Image (cartoon, rainbow, N blue to C red):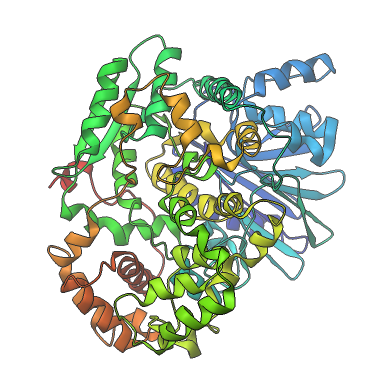
């Protein structure tokens, strides 16, 4: 696991390129504290910060082929590297290491850019072909590993994190108001956009070929948008998922450094721990964080006892949230998922004992675990009522009622299509005329909330509506929120997080399972829970779902209420983009317990904190707070 950065600019001197790439990689030390490495040539500079996980002695980057005509820097793990190495040796390639990084250069010699189709794992890499003078950037299929870039005037900068790209570019970045609006609506900024104009995220499953001063994006994999060929029976599906997940877990246990697993007590992480514990010779180390009175920790302890893991816990109090502002230094742009706080602390806890952890992320998107899928199933009957009648009976009254009126959101949902209800669930209203928090003139307009997902809904048009919602979440919320959070918070502590449920073969398998086997009227992840019953006690499998989160709503009414007062200050940076009367109303409703506005309030607080950091200027990344300081 590493941080990578580089520049491709034909008109710049080697000295200038080396100076820039060294500054860029210096911003990524937390991703790779063990060693650095550089390749500098005419028109190109590649840099790496390495976290040693596989082949601790021989895997230093950049790594080249025998003739030095191909050079690569790489972030991630290719789990089938041993199989690929044997295949390439039979084809006459010589290897100087056991590193999975070296496999990439020889694979490129054999297959060119099509090499990515043969990789199983999580990765972001940059490969320079000196003979064709082509830079190839690639990101894994699901977007587990990040990659950012900036193309301008025939030059290209790239890096594992946005801060590295900004550091190398000779221009000051400008905030993109459209991205800022997207953040307020979604809580994150979707690829390819970033908070800065012209700076981009490489989308998951995409190659970027840069040649002759021009960049070409080439998608090589997409989340399956078709249903089929369908698996014949639920029993067959359970067997296939069981076998596929066991293989994925087994592959992700390969490591030359200590390894453990996150254990929240939910079905996904518990299932991963159960399978991993059966594949390891000694006690598997597991890690959990919670807060006083948190029932989740009971379930985590139950699984730990069942599988004899070496279990570690940390209790968080309200003071844990005081590091949230500092965490923005790792995201480099506003990020509104409050579960980043416990993810930061569980990563810090794990890093005290291991360098690699398994994580249970991905099960909700693949198998229907979110509340919104149950919500959709319960209200699907509404579509049998003609839309025009619903618009008259529900839509018109919702437009006439004052913002904040109890029941207005329910009326809007009843007037909407199923896709529209999904958008209402997934986004926050920005238009102040409808109770939103945004200032129209400063946010680049107010798109209809459904427009945020229009392209993805269209791409999944061949799927039934309910399956389409999972498809959209896998393309949007999963890479740009969930996986971004896990990557940044784990790498903040130089910890590698692996996600077995997002093995792309398992993702393709899940796409062949009918939706009715995933979501019933009152429960989600039906088919995955049937797999879990083979390994977990009923009390874990059948309990209600609860996300990896802290009691932010109550803490905002108590220990963190002063943060809301700071937000209401007219001089607060965020207020430049917000509709003051609406923000005051939302804060007042939350404090008086009329509504739970924790989601939008947290987003506003993080936006304000990020803007304050930008005004102060860049800082070097370091872990902000020791875990023991967060104990409540």
The front one of 557 and 521 is: 521
Q: Would you say residue 425 is visible in this rendering?
A: yes
Quarter assignment of residue 266: top left
Residue 10 falls in image quadrant: bottom right
Frontmost residue, 47 versus 278 = 278
Is residue 34 in view? Answer: no
Q: Position of residue 179 (x, y in %)?
A: 53, 72
Name the side, left or right, on which 39 lies relative to 163. right
- Residue drawn at point x = 34 percent, y = 51 percent: 339
- Percent across and percent down for residue 107 are 77, 30
- The residue drawn where x is 48% and y is 38% is 363
Total marks in image: 0
Q: Nearest the camera: 76 or 452?
A: 452
Q: Position of residue 150 (x, y in %)?
A: 65, 63
Please determine whether, in this image, residue 609 is positioned above or below residue 144.
below
Is 562 on the left-hand or right-hand side of 468? left
- Side (left or right) of 297 relative to 195: left
- In the depicted view, which residue is nearer to us: 522 or 528? 522
Q: Quadrant of residue 73?
A: top right
> Residue placed at 49% from the left, 29% from the top?
52
Judged left or right of residue 572, residue 508 is right
Residue at x 55% of width, y 84% of height: 445
Q: Residue 563: where, in percent of width, then height?
A: 21, 70
Work out which residue is located at the far right of the displayed protein and give it.
Answer: 132
Q: Residue furthest top?
A: 281
Q: Is residue 340 above or below residue 451?
A: above
């Amino acid at each position: 696991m590493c941080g990578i950065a580089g520049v491709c600019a034909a008109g710049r001197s080697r000295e200038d390129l080396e100076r820039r790439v060294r500054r860029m990689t210096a911003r990524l030390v937390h991703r790779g504290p063990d060693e650095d490495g550089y390749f500098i040539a005419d028109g190109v500079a590649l840099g790496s910060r390495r976290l040693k996980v596989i082949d601790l002695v021989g895997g230093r980057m950049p790594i080249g082929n025998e003739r030095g005509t191909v050079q690569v820097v790489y972030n991630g793990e290719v789990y089938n590297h041993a199989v690929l190495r044997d295949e390439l040796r039979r084809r006459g390639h010589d290897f100087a290491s056991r590193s999975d990084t070296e496999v990439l250069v020889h694979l490129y010699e054999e297959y060119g850019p099509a090499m990515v189709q043969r990789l199983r794992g999580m990765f972001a890499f940059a490969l320079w072909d000196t003979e064709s003078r082509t830079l190839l950037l690639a990101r894994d299929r699901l977007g587990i590993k990040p990659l950012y870039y900036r193309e301008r005037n025939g030059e290209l900068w790239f890096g594992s994190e946005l801060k590295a790209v900004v550091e190398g570019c000779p221009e000051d970045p400008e905030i993109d108001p459209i991205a800022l609006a997207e953040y307020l609506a979604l809580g994150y900024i979707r690829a390819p956009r970033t908070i800065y104009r012209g700076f981009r995220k490489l989308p998951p499953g995409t190659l970027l070929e840069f040649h002759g001063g021009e960049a070409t994006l080439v998608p090589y994999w997409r989340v399956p948008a078709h249903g089929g060929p369908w698996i014949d029976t639920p029993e067959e599906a359970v067997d296939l998922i069981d076998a596929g997940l066991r293989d994925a877990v087994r592959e992700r246990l390969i490591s030359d450094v200590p390894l453990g697993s996150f254990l929240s007590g939910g079905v996904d992480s518990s299932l991963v721990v159960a399978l991993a514990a059966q594949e390891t010779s000694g006690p598997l180390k597991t890690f959990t964080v919670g807060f006083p009175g948190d029932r989740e920790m009971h379930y985590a302890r139950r699984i730990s006892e069942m599988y004899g893991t070496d279990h570690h816990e940390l209790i968080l109090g309200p003071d844990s949230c005081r590091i949230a502002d500092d965490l923005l230094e790792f995201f480099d742009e506003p990020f509104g998922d409050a579960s980043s706080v416990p993810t930061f602390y569980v990563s810090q806890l794990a890093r005290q004992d291991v360098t690699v952890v398994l994580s249970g992320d991905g099960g909700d998107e693949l198998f229907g675990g979110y509340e919104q899928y149950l919500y959709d199933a319960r209200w699907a009957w509404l579509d049998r009522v003609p839309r025009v009648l619903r618009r008259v009976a529900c839509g018109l009254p919702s437009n006439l009622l004052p913002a904040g009126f109890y029941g207005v959101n329910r009326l809007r949902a009843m007037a909407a299509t199923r896709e529209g209800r999904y958008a209402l669930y997934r986004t926050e209203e920005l238009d102040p005329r409808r109770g939103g928090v945004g200032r129209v003139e400063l946010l680049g307009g107010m798109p209809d909330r459904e427009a945020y997902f229009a392209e993805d809904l269209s791409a999944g048009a061949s799927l039934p509506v309910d399956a389409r919602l999972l498809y959209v979440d896998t393309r949007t919320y999963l890479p740009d929120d969930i996986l971004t959070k896990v990557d940044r918070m784990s790498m903040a502590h130089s910890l590698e997080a692996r996600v077995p449920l997002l093995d792309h073969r398992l993702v393709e398998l899940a796409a062949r399972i009918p939706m009715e086997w995933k979501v019933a009227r009152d429960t989600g992840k039906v088919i995955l829970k049937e797999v879990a019953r083979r390994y977990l006690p009923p009390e874990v499998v059948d309990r209600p779902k609860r996300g990896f989160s802290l009691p932010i709503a109550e803490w905002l009414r108590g220990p963190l209420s002063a943060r809301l007062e700071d937000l209401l200050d007219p001089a607060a940076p965020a207020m430049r983009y917000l509709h003051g009367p609406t923000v005051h109303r939302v804060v007042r409703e939350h404090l008086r317990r009329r509504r739970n506005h924790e989601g939008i309030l947290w987003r506003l607080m993080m936006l304000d904190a990020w803007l304050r950091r930008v005004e102060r200027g860049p800082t070097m990344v370091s872990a902000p707070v020791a875990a023991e300081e967060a104990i409540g």
